[in-house]
Image (cartoon, rainbow, N blue to C red):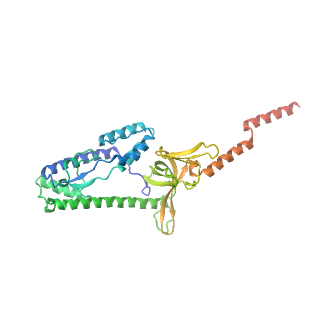
């Protein structure tokens, strides 16, 4: 592995095995502390999503002949498994669907068991009636609280006074939710910063010579979303599996307002470009399509911006240049006349005629 490289985090079967045991431990502990402290337990709930939150993904999946059901978490999991089988020709599409389905859900939250009815304790994402965080006390304060509740429940240590106040637990849970969200945002900002440094070509210093192993890259990407609104700038967002990053591809060579050759297809989440003479569709990009992109960093005096440019299909990246190149090739073929094989045979015939004479 290159220590200066950027890549998506790889998960192995061992990761899944450890995760299953962690989930089981968390569920078991949540049940134990609930039996002893039914109104004072620190739990984690995940409400079921509204259908409107999944509407966009359901419509996008239909364009690939995939049906996603969200009646409950089991049906969602089953439908994603079925989608994976249907899209087995490209395994990454299965992973992409799972990533997008997770984003459609509302975030899970810490809460005090005395504040909600038992039916609202359910964790939708894990299909668990009760759940808590217990396995990572070295990095989450919620786990520390749960450890203290469990210690009191099994008679190892007395319950701290502050954990016996429902109002204090309410404030504690609200603060943990805010801190958890802030930590997520900080983590994403850190990834964005170091991604910029990598694609800028080095360590990000003023005197950087660009030898850090990064720089401009060309990679395959998958389309996540397509902007098809009238008069909007033609663009689409992509995920680059090689680096696990996202970016917005802007079709700057196409005038979104005046170019009559631009085809917007909201129903199929597609952007296309048609031949100005025949009206025939020359190229298009739809959701979940694979495209080729160039990733680089635009630098100004006080700012750096990650830019993702489209390389293929070229007819969308730069229609005017692609059409001009196509026409010039046709003209060259016409000017060349018959094929080289035909011209060679004519030369042979001329040589035979000369020898006869």
Q: Quadrant of the C terminus?
A: top right
Q: For this rendering, which residue is in front, 67 or 338?
A: 67
- Quadrant of residue 330 within the rendered picture: top right
Q: Residue furthest front?
A: 230
Q: Is residue 78 left or right of residue 210?
A: left
- Quadrant of residue 58 within the rendered picture: top left
> Can residue 122 be seen in the rendering of this structure?
yes
Residue 248 place in picture, x, y as percent: 48, 55
Q: Is residue 137 left or right of residue 244?
A: left
- Quadrant of residue 253 within the rendered picture: bottom right
Q: Residue at x 19, y 58 (%)?
A: 145
Residue 213 place in picture, x, y as percent: 48, 58
Q: Residue furthest right?
A: 357
Residue 8 place in picture, x, y as percent: 41, 51
Q: For this rendering, which residue is in front, 94 or 119?
A: 119
> Can residue 134 be seen in the rendering of this structure?
no
Q: For this rendering, which residue is in front, 165 or 186?
A: 165
Q: Is residue 127 left or right of residue 155?
A: right
Q: Residue at x 71, y 42 (%)?
A: 333
Residue 19 place in picture, x, y as percent: 28, 47
Q: Residue at x 38, y 58 (%)?
A: 188
């Amino acid at each position: 592995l290159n220590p200066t490289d950027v890549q998506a985090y790889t998960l192995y079967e061992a990761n899944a095995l450890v995760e299953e045991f962690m989930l089981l431990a968390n569920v078991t502990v949540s049940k134990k502390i609930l039996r002893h402290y039914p109104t004072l337990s620190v739990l984690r709930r995940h409400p079921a999503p509204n259908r409107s939150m999944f509407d966009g993904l359901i419509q996008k999946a239909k364009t690939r002949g995939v049906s996603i059901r969200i009646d409950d978490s089991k049906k969602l999991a089953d439908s994603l498994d079925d989608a994976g089988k249907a899209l087995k020709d490209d395994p990454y599409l299965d992973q992409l669907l799972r990533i997008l389905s997770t984003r459609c859900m509302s975030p899970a939250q810490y809460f005090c068991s005395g504040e909600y009815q038992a039916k609202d304790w359910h964790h939708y994402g894990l299909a668990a009636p009760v759940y808590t965080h217990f396995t990572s006390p070295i990095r989450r304060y919620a786990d520390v609280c749960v450890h203290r509740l469990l210690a009191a429940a099994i008679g190892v240590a007395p319950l701290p006074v502050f954990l016996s106040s429902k109002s204090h637990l309410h404030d504690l849970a609200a603060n943990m939710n805010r801190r958890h969200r802030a930590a997520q945002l900080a983590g994403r900002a850190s990834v964005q910063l170091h991604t910029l440094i990598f694609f800028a070509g080095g360590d990000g210093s003023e005197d950087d010579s660009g030898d850090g192993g990064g720089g401009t890259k060309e990679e395959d990407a998958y389309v996540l979303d397509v902007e098809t609104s009238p008069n909007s700038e033609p663009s689409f967002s992509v995920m680059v599996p090689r680096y696990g990053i996202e970016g917005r591809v802007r079709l700057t060579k196409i005038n979104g307002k005046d170019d009559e050759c631009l085809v917007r297809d909201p129903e199929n989440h597609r952007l296309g470009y048609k031949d100005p003479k025949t009206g025939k569709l020359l190229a298009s990009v739809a959701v979940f399509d694979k495209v080729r992109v160039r990733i680089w960093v635009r630098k100004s005096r006080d700012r750096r911006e990650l830019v993702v440019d489209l390389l293929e299909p070229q007819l969308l990246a730069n229609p005017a240049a692609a059409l001009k190149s196509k026409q010039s090739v046709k003209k060259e073929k016409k000017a060349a006349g018959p094929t080289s094989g035909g011209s060679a045979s004519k030369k042979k015939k001329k040589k035979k005629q000369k020898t006869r004479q």
